[in-house]
């Protein structure tokens, strides 16, 4: 009974975390599903977003401006990965890992700006001292200060803007790039530039999420993005497995990723209440993602209806 | 319209797998020419199309389209002049996008992609009419995902996309080879109709000698990376499969049964 009560009690927190991470999940959806690129930059760009946002707020810059700067920093990170991938010809996964690694050093430096230290691994934000847009302190309050309100609005705005963008000529060409590169180029689409653009947008969103999380938790740390890509993938995949059959509209698909992130945090909260340590979470997350990635594959492989051929992915090129 | 000057292309140069795919290839096509291309496996047919489209760079030589040297232009920029249909029906369309979205992408070939809507209401009507012409029942399925269509339907759609904005050059790479005979005939009919209607300058590779003879105003045969036979005008109209086989043996200096099999 106590377990249940404390679980229910922590539900608002799970929702808050889920919404903030949900924006990152949308960013992951754009690279992983729309562009068909596995981008590992996010572990770094999430922390970059948190670091830049916390630094700017600490320096007395308005939190909205601070978050915009965080988004710009994330976009820059995405651009670097895109540059490595398209101009330098480095495979996308490796390009992301390189940027992510480089960002670790950069984030430590960024957080030390103005403090007199050379590097810094943590920047604390306190709702009493700083002007914050969202804070977990008010998560149970029934006032406009409750972070759930702003987070929900932000998620809605992000989904709305992306829905509009991916319906434009440019956005459509981005989807075509992810769907079929040969076709995209044959239709005059610069697939390299589109991949860079997709990575820029995605990492901008990831950094926005990082900036929100730093305020929500009351600190930015250099480690806050560790394993973020796996959480993002977990959210995307949970959303698809549970809602893929009913959500066909693009905006709803993005929403499914956010719902996936919320469900992920509800499950995590439950597991923590059952007595696991928070350090066990990474193991748990990895297992959750592995299981959810396995389900569709095995379904296809072992439970396929007889007589229904696998869709051909590539044909034979002739001479 | 298209001019290929002394094109050389070698794959895996300097290794045991070295393969000279194009060997001093020269071709000059006039505006409105419909050229059919035949030749055995490894003759360089697909490589020729791929260097024209920019999917592959050349080692040597120049490619000119409508007076403009495009040898150094990347594939996506050459697309402004070129419409393409591939051999693989999966390759020419985006499976996860709708029929109308695919067409809308093709309608913007060679234009800057802006933040205007990716498709307008007027376009939908236009696409409906064009799809009607294909006679495949696609006109009522504008919002169907292309991945749900059959190979033949996808190939017909690709053809429509390739010609939606009249290209200076249409490249068809055995675009009916992967289809069943009935569907292949239908797609070929549509091809003939569109090419003659818009007087498109067309380069069509085929494995089928009868098709090569029946279509187009000019027939070229490739062997060992260049053109060994070039038949036009009245001569082409009177051509038979037997003629072609005989002339091929003569031109290539080989009468191996293999080659005949591959060609028939």
Image (tube, grey):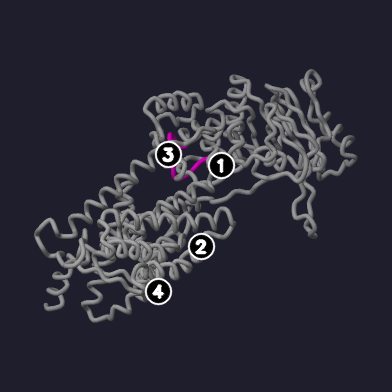
Few, some or many residues within 10 Å of mark 1 (<14, 14–19, 20+)? many
Residue at image coords 47%, 69%: A101
Residue at image coords 32%, 44%: A161
Residue B219 visible in the snapshot:
yes
Chain identifier of the residue bearing label 1 in the image = A
Chain identifier of the residue bearing label 2 in the image = A
Q: Position of residue B221 (x, y in %)?
A: 79, 34
Which image quadrant is residue A289 in?
Answer: bottom left
Chain identifier of the residue bearing label 4 in the image = A
**Residue segment shown in magenta:** B91-102
Residue B264 visible in the snapshot:
no
Disc 3 to disc 1: CB gap under 8 Å: no
**Residue under label 1:** A185
**Residue under label 2:** A93
Q: Are marks 3 and 2 on the same chain?
A: no
Q: Are marks 1 and 4 on the same chain?
A: yes
**Residue under label 3:** B98
Image position of A216 (left or right of B39): left
Q: Position of residue A189 (x, y in %)?
A: 53, 40
**Label 1 to label 4, Cα distance in Å?**
45 Å
Residue A191 located within the stretch drawn in magenta: no
Sequence-first tag of 2 and 4: 2
**Residue under label 4:** A119
Image position of B254 (left or right of A284): right
Residue at image coords 27%, 80%: A276
Image position of A165 (left or right of B199): left
Give the mark count. Answer: 4
């Amino acid at each position: 009974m106590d377990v249940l009560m404390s679980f229910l009690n922590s539900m608002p927190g799970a929702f808050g975390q889920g919404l903030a991470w949900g924006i990152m999940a949308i960013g992951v959806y754009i690279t992983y599903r729309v562009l068909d690129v596995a981008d590992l930059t996010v572990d770094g760009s999430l922390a970059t977003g948190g670091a830049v946002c916390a630094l700017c707020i600490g320096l007395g810059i308005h939190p909205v401006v601070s978050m915009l700067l965080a988004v710009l920093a994330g976009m820059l990170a995405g651009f670097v990965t895109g540059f490595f991938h398209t101009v330098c010809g480095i495979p996308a996964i490796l390009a992301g890992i390189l940027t992510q690694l480089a960002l670790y050093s950069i984030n430590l430096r960024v957080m030390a700006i103005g403090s007199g230290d050379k590097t810094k691994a943590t920047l604390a934000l306190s709702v009493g001292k700083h002007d914050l847009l969202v804070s977990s302190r008010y998560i149970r309050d029934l006032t406009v200060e409750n972070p759930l309100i702003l987070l929900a609005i932000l998620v809605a705005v992000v989904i709305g803007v992306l829905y509009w963008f991916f319906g434009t000529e440019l956005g459509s060409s981005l989807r075509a790039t992810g769907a079929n590169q040969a076709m995209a180029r044959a239709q005059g689409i610069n697939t390299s530039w589109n991949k860079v653009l997709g990575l820029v947008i995605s990492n901008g969103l990831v950094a926005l999420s990082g900036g929100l999380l730093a305020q929500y938790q009351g600190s930015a740390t250099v480690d806050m993005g560790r394993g973020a890509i796996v959480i993002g993938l977990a959210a995307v995949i949970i959303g698809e497995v549970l809602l893929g059959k009913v959500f066909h509209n693009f905006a709803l698909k993005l929403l499914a990723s956010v719902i996936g992130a919320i469900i992920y945090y509800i499950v995590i909260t439950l597991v923590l209440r059952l007595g696991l340590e928070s350090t066990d979470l990474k193991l748990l997350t990895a297992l959750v993602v592995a299981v959810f990635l396995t389900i569709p594959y095995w379904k296809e492989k072992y439970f396929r209806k007889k007589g229904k051929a696998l869709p051909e992915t590539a044909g034979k090129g002739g001479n | 319209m298209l001019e290929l000057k002394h094109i050389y292309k070698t794959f895996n140069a300097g290794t045991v797998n070295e393969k000279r795919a194009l060997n001093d290839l020269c071709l000059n096509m006039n505006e409105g020419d419909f050229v059919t291309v035949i030749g055995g496996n490894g003759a360089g047919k697909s490589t020729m199309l791929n260097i024209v489209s920019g999917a592959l760079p050349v080692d040597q030589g120049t490619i000119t389209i409508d007076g403009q040297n495009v040898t150094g232009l990347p594939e996506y920029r050459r697309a402004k002049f070129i419409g393409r249909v591939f051999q693989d029906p999966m390759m020419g369309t985006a499976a996860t996008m709708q029929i109308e979205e695919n067409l809308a992408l093709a309608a913007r070939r060679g234009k800057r992609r802006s933040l205007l809507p990716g498709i307008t209401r007027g376009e939908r009507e236009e696409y409906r009419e064009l799809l009607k012409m294909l006679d495949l029942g696609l006109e009522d399925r504008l919002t169907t995902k292309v991945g749900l269509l059959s190979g033949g339907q996808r190939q017909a759609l690709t053809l429509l996309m390739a010609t939606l904005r009249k290209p200076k050059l249409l490249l068809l790479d055995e675009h009916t080879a992967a289809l069943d005979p009935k569907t292949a005939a239908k797609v070929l009919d549509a091809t003939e109709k569109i090419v003659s209607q818009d007087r498109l300058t067309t380069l069509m590779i085929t494995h089928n000698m009868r098709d090569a003879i029946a279509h187009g105003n000019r027939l070229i045969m490739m062997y060992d990376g260049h053109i060994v036979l070039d038949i036009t005008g009245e001569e082409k109209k009177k051509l038979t499969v037997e003629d072609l086989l005989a002339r091929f043996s003569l031109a290539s200096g080989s009468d191996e049964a293999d080659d005949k099999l591959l060609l028939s």
